[in-house]
């Protein structure tokens, strides 16, 4: 039965054509050049994608810096400076969450656990968002923002005319290790690129008629917190 199959004219022609194709070297030089170019081309495409994501994260840090300094300016006269800075940090985390990575694993693979702040953020998102993502993904983004966003604000303001400046730093994670080796810094087994933005805003502390500064909201209610 096997000899009949091998003696079939169609099978013989197919075997001859296969052997002839395997022995031919026509076009091998062109194929080699394509094979050598493809990895470089793929790396270039990944570089374009990663840099576009970095530019998006840069926009996020600009907005987060504005949110932080705006919060510090509004709260600097309504509470203590330490609490005002905490509120500024929280504002930066919330502003950076849409731009933060939601796919980076935590240490030991532990899932993101909702906290009071993150739970309130997700609750507000569920109420106001039209096209919702999963709560797990949103928690991962908020958790990454809290771990990789740093806020620095010098203060408290010395007078009503003083300016406040917030500096926000974000560790952008690379998803392609080859691009991370070219542009990033290796920390804890992963490659990151540090993105920094600053925002300055006049202090909004209340002032008396003689232009002196007072740490109250100016209408007799005192501090809110």
Image (spheres, rainbow, N blue to C red):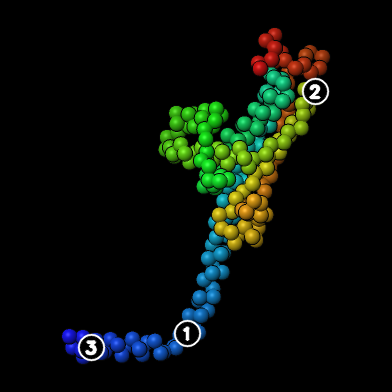
Quadrant of the drawing holding the C terminus: top right
Secondary structure under the numbered disc 2 in the rendered image = loop
Across the whole image, how many numbered discs are drawn on residues? 3
Provide the residue designation for mark 2. 159
Q: Where does the image place residue 8, in percent across and percent down from the top left?
A: 20, 88
Provide the residue designation for mark 1. 28
Q: CA distance from mark 3 to mark 2?
A: 98 Å
Q: In this rendering, is residue 73 above or below 99?
A: above
Instruction: Give yes or no for contact between labels 2 and 1 (Cβ–Cβ under 8 Å).
Output: no
Q: Identify the residue at image location x=44%, y=88%.
A: 26
Foreground label between 3 and 2:
3
Q: Identify the residue at image location x=64%, y=40%.
A: 149
Foreground label between 3 and 1:
3
Earlier residue among tags 3 and 1: 3
Q: Residue furthest top?
A: 220
Residue 38, visible in the rendered structure: yes
Q: Where does the image place residue 155, in percent across and percent down from the top left?
A: 77, 29
Quadrant of the drawing holding the N terminus: bottom left
Q: Identify the residue at image location x=48%, y=41%.
A: 137
- Residue 6 is labelled as 3
Q: Nearer the viewer, residue 43 or 206?
A: 43
Q: Where does the image place residue 211, in percent across and percent down from the top left?
A: 80, 17
- Residue 220 is labelled as none
Q: Residues within 10 Å of mark 3 (few under 14, many from 20)?
A: few
* Residue 16 as seen in the image, left or right of residue 150: left
Q: Identify the residue at image location x=20%, y=89%.
A: 3
Earlier residue among tags 2 and 1: 1
**Residue 177 occupies quadrant:** bottom right
Q: Where does the image place residue 9, in percent across and percent down from the top left?
A: 21, 90
């Amino acid at each position: 039965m096997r000899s009949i199959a091998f003696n079939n004219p169609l099978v013989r022609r197919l075997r001859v054509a296969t052997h002839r194709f395997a022995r031919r070297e026509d076009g091998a030089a062109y194929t080699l050049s394509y094979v050598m170019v493809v990895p470089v081309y793929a790396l270039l495409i990944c570089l374009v994608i990663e840099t576009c994501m970095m530019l998006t994260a840069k926009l996020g840090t600009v907005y987060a810096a504005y949110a932080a300094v705006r919060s510090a300016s509004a709260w600097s006269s309504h509470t203590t400076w330490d609490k005002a800075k905490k509120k500024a940090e929280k504002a930066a985390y919330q502003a950076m969450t849409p731009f933060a990575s939601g796919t980076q694993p935590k240490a030991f693979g532990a899932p993101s656990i909702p906290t009071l702040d993150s739970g309130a953020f997700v609750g507000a998102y569920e109420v106001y968002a039209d096209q919702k993502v999963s709560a797990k993904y949103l928690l991962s983004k908020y958790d990454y923002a809290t771990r990789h966003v740093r806020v620095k604000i010098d203060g408290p303001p010395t007078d009503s005319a003083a300016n406040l400046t917030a500096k926000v730093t974000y560790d952008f994670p690379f998803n392609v290790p080859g691009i991370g080796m070219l542009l990033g810094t290796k920390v804890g087994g992963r490659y990151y690129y540090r993105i920094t933005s600053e925002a300055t805003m006049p202090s909004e502390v209340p002032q008396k008629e003689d232009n002196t500064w007072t740490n109250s909201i100016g209408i007799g209610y005192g501090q809110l917190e």
